[in-house]
Amino acid sequence: MHFFTPVNAEDILMGQSTSESQFGSIFQIYKSTDDFPELEEVNMAIVGVCEDRNAPDNSGSKNAPDAVRAFLYKLFGTGFTAKVADLGNIMPGHSTEDTYFALRSVVDHLVRKNIIPIILGGSQDLTYAQFLGYKDLEQTINMVSVDSVFDLGNPDEEIANHSYLGKIILHQPNFLFNYSNMGYQTYLVDQNSLGMMTKLYFDFYRLGQIRDKIEIAEPIIRQADMMSFDITSIKHSDAPANPNASPNGFYSEEACQMLRYAGMNDRLSSLGIYEINPDFDESGKTAHLAAQMIWCFMDGYYNRKNDYPSRTNPDYTRFHVIMESEKHEINFYKSKKSDRWWMEIPYPPIKGAKFERHTLIPCNYSDYELAVSGEIPDRWWQTYQKLS
């Protein structure tokens, strides 16, 4: 993996040593050019990306990876055995396109080896490179973003940290099946953007919706193959390390809970945390929070149930709901392992296998209750429209 520069763990820890049960001792860390980690037994890989040239409003976020490591290495792997490699940092290429190519190649390589890259940005336009890592995997994917805005931008603009999503949506060939935003703040979002998201049958959930009942986030996240987390979605008092941080946003505990949901998602194969700027951090508060979020992701991963449903598997209870006022029938599946729910979307066989992996979508008990009462759940209808 010739894209990486080794980590200077001694400088990061300021000469302090770590005990045998802290991540600084547990992780396989790329510390010297002749000692790249073996990946055979690894479940996750830390990937630092020191790139922020397309974030003129947040210059300095390129220094985030080592700032997060300073706290991550000191955490204890209590409750699970972390099989994690820290691959070091991808340094800025001659152009941002070079950096994107490096990250894209790394994501592709790791996902093929069933290793989850945990990407420490850098600016959030790196999400585009994270997305491109799936281009050659010959499947359509779902993406979830925790963000206070949509970052659609103008199609004619150069890519930036506030316009990367538009590039993803317009990418050809198109391999994005669904995009979900969690935590958008209405007063920060243009009405036209909301209209576009609706027309594309994408999911978007206001900050208040998620904060009112954090459990709503679980099935949204469970549908995703990749996750992008903008640190500015967390309120300034909990995560000040960005000049654009908002007084409103998620609390740190909610961010950690969402990352645990992400870890428990059997399908999620890459995670990116972006926009942390150490120049604005107060006593390392944001970097410390990001480290704890990663810990929660790992805790979720090592508590995965591996219970993505099969239509004939006896480990699931099947519920068949006939909609009296509609011409639809909905099959629900409930896991006996985890009590989690899915619902089935009818899919025309003539369309082949391209979208078949999206015909069983995560949901919760309230979706089942809604169907029993005679109403079609929104997430069922949106997916049905895309598959029809």
Image: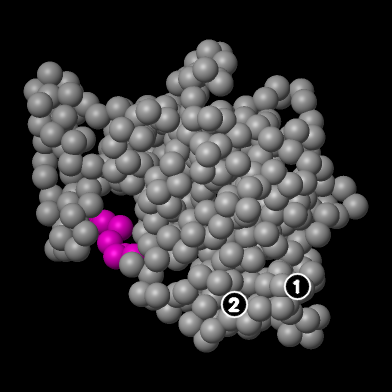
Residue at left offset 15%, top offset 31%: 371
Residue at left offset 49%, top offset 25%: 185
Q: Select label 1 or label 2 by which is in front.
A: 1
Marks 1 & 2, CB-CB < 8 Å contact = no
311, 240: nearer the viewer? 240
Q: Which mark is residue 24?
A: 2
Give the residue type at disc 2: Gly
State left or right for residue 12 relative to residue 205: right
Residue at the disc numbered 1: 11
**SS state under label 1:** helix
Q: Which residues are magenta?
A: 304-311
- Mark closest to the chain's N terminus, 1 or 2: 1
State left or right for residue 334 relative to residue 197: left
Residue 308 counted in the magenta span: yes
Q: Quadrant of residue 377?
A: top left
233 relative to 298, above or below: above
Can residue 222 be seen? yes
Residue 222, percent from left and from top: 37, 49
Q: Quadrant of the N terminus?
A: bottom right
Residue at left offset 51%, top offset 43%: 238
Residue 285, percent from left and from top: 57, 52
